[in-house]
Image (spheres, helix red, strand yellow):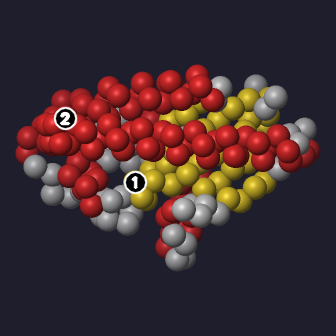
Amino acid sequence: MKIAILLTALLSFNASANEHLAFTQQSQSAIKEFATSLKAELITAMKAGGPIEAITVCNQVAPKIAENLSQKYNMKIGRTSLKVRNNKNKADKWESEILTQFEYLKQSGDSINSLAFSEAISTDEGIEMRMMKAIPTGQVCLTCHGSNIAANVQARIHTLYPDDQATGFSVGDIRGAFTIHQAAQ
């Protein structure tokens, strides 16, 4: 899979181009590992107990995967969306802007699989490296994120996520994005 990455090395913030490139490459590895691990867990859960079990994976296992990978890669790794299911994953201002840009690029004909962005930004705490990679909505995602969700699945979602906004998606939509940030060295 070829990923087009727009690299923005903001040297005025003392983030070197090499440091930014290293961060971007490490982030790509972390995202790939997160996506692969989560997908494997979801497939196993769907085979074992259907969508109800998969919802449990998203609720309990996905945060543990993110936490373990965050420690492994020494960066904060997670998922976010413009329509979150879990309020703990709500997009911050930067993430919202990038997700909005991803939507624009998708509407302009860019492939969701090519939508990734990395940059160094200035925060109150100093320079921070940030990266996001879009997550496409596949057919199986519609079981829990589509417009026609089974009543028992919807009930389980509502129990775990009473403020759920993550429904109404169609195949090919941007479901959200993997998001990473790390303080510059």
Q: Residue at x 90, y 38 (%)?
A: 14
User: With 74 as the anchor, is 86 left or right in this view?
Assistant: left
Give the mark nearer the N terminus: 2 vs 1: 2
**Which one is in front in this view, the residue at disc 2 or the one at disc 1?**
2
Looking at the image, which is closer to me, 51 or 166?
51
Q: Are the residues flagged by discs 2 and 1 in contact, CB closer than 8 Å?
A: no
How far across and down, in percent of the image, does residue 5 sit? 67, 59
In the picture, which quadrant includes the N terminus? bottom right
Mark 2 is surrounded, within 10 Å at the Cα level, by few (under 14), some (14 to 19) or many (20 or more) other residues, namely some
The residue at the far left in this view is: 151
User: SS class of the residue under badge 1?
Assistant: strand
User: With 153 as the anchor, is 65 left or right in this view?
Assistant: right
Q: Residue at x 25, y 55 (%)?
A: 140
Q: Residue at x 35, y 28 (%)?
A: 61
How far across and down, in percent of the image, does residue 88 sit? 43, 30
Residue at the disc numbered 2:
53
Separation of residues labelled 2 and 1 (CA atoms): 20 Å
Residue 36, quarter of picture: top left
Residue type at the position of mark 1: Arg
- Disc marking residue 146: none
How far across and down, in percent of the image, does residue 85 sit? 33, 40
Residue at the disc numbered 1:
175
